[in-house]
Image (cartoon, grey):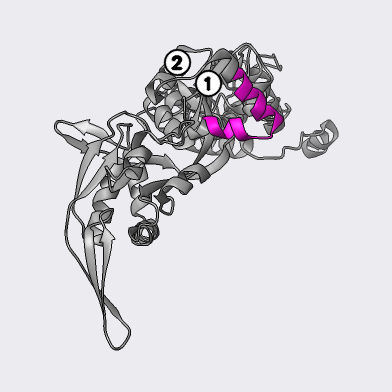
Amino acid sequence: MVKISNMREFAGFSICLVLLLGSEICIAARQELIVTTIKQDPYTMSKGSQLEGYCMDLLSELAKKLGFKYKVHLVKDGAYGRQDESGNWNGMIGEVVRGEADLAVAPLTLTAAREKAVGMTKPYMQTGISILLRKDIVSEEAGFFDFLSPFSGETWFGILIAYFVTAVCICIVGRLSPCEWSQPETEQNRFTLLHSLWYAAGALSLQGAGPHPKAVSGRVICCTWWLFAVVVLACYFSSLSSSQGSDSAPLTIKGFDDLANQEVMEYGTLAGSSTLAFFKNSNNPSYRRIYEHMERRKSFVSSMDEGVQRAKEGNFAFIGESVSLDLAVARHCELVRAHEVIGMRGYSIVAPLGSSMLKNLSVAILQLSEAGELAYLRTKWWASSCVPDSAKASSLRAHSMKGIFLVLAIGLGIGVLISLFELTSKSRSTAGEQKKSCCTVLTQELSQRLRMSHTKNDPETSDKNKA
């Protein structure tokens, strides 16, 4: 049995031989397919005399898998495909319906109306409807710990470590320096660890917490800590005020309900698009108000580029396909896409109605998806050229404040060295008076001063010892 089917829409024709075992061998005549597309970044773009983009790469991969040749041309009327009142289609859909093209490979949304007129494959990309607008118009709900946002976690951890190390150094210097603690046998040390922690906390909050150190070594450490505290607080309040200032906008748009319930900002979508049809046919009150507003104001745009440009200029929200808006955000750093996405749908490849090639194309698309090729193409053509969000980038990291941390470390080191020098000088003087070795006296002083607990000599005990 030999079956010859009309395959103009796929590859001319194919001859299928049914063997006795029931298997079918198909021999396809390799005729060039006529593929229609439309210029839209990054799906199809001009590169010299050639075309490139996501759809061109996808078409190339499908051709390799299914073994067909193709020739691409741009749609003559520059439209995606819309049905007029008489039932005729324009754009790429119309070219496929009239037999002027075998395939339409472009960001064509799978809709019920189009499915009646042409055949559409399994979606090669999922999308939805969202809002594109300037960043200064979007408001994110404040969190309980937003007051910590001026500094990163690394910086907060560094400040905490610096606080404890400084308190320990104040405590050590308060014990080592004879100018601070001259009579360890009879005097109670004022700079215990608890008091040192309290003193450092008071300085960090710009509040005095006496008593203050008298020795040069203690003053060096405290002055360095005061400088550290002033710089840290200045950076904190500067970053906090700038982040609050960037979020303060007279109008906040977080989703479609906010858009429908305000009259200050203009908004619109692409004329004749499936996005417009979604709002037109929706029974949701908010979506109906959005459609009626756009219809009343005639706030439609003729192209994606025009919608992006109006959003960049401000006071305009562009409603469109989420994947297309994601590309605009990747290319224009002052724009942002709202988190809300509605009306999930997919982009499909179009072929003539009843075409036997649809199943092969759908299977090939699923294979590319399972192999990660579609995800790779998405990453390749949607690469962002923007730096991280300014609000997040304003969080100061530890390395951006390494200078003041270095100054603090040097100050602590100098203070401890001065305290050792002060103790050595006193030990040398005492050794000369008592005619002992300086090392012996210094060792005794260190042992006595660094004991964690000290019992003051009671006068009665001293009298008994004398007796």
Residue pointed to by mark 1: 268
User: Please, which residue is most extreme toward the front here?
Assistant: 86
Compared with 420, 57 (above or below) is below
Q: Is residue 385 magenta?
A: no
Q: Which is nearer the eye, 31 or 416?
A: 31
Q: Is residue 159 left or right of residue 73?
A: right
In the picture of the structure, the residue carrying the numbered disc 2 is 310
Quarter of the image where the N terminus is located: bottom left
- Quarter where residue 52 is shown: top left
Structural crowding at the residue carrying mark 1, measured as other residues with C-alpha within 10 Å and reported as few (<14), some (14–19) or many (≥20): many
Residue 366 at x, y = what percent? 39, 59
Q: Position of residue 442 (x, y in %)?
A: 52, 34
- Disc 1 from disc 2: Cα separation: 10 Å
Whole-percent x, y for residue 447 in the image: 59, 40
Q: Is residue 464 left or right of residue 362?
A: right
Q: Image quarter for residue 400?
A: top left
Secondary structure, mark 1, is: strand
For the point 39% across and 52% down, the residue is 353
Q: Position of residue 96 (x, y in %)?
A: 33, 44
Front disc: 1 or 2: 1
Residue stretch in magenta: 276-293
- Residue 406 position by quadrant: top left
Which structural element holds mark 2?
Answer: helix
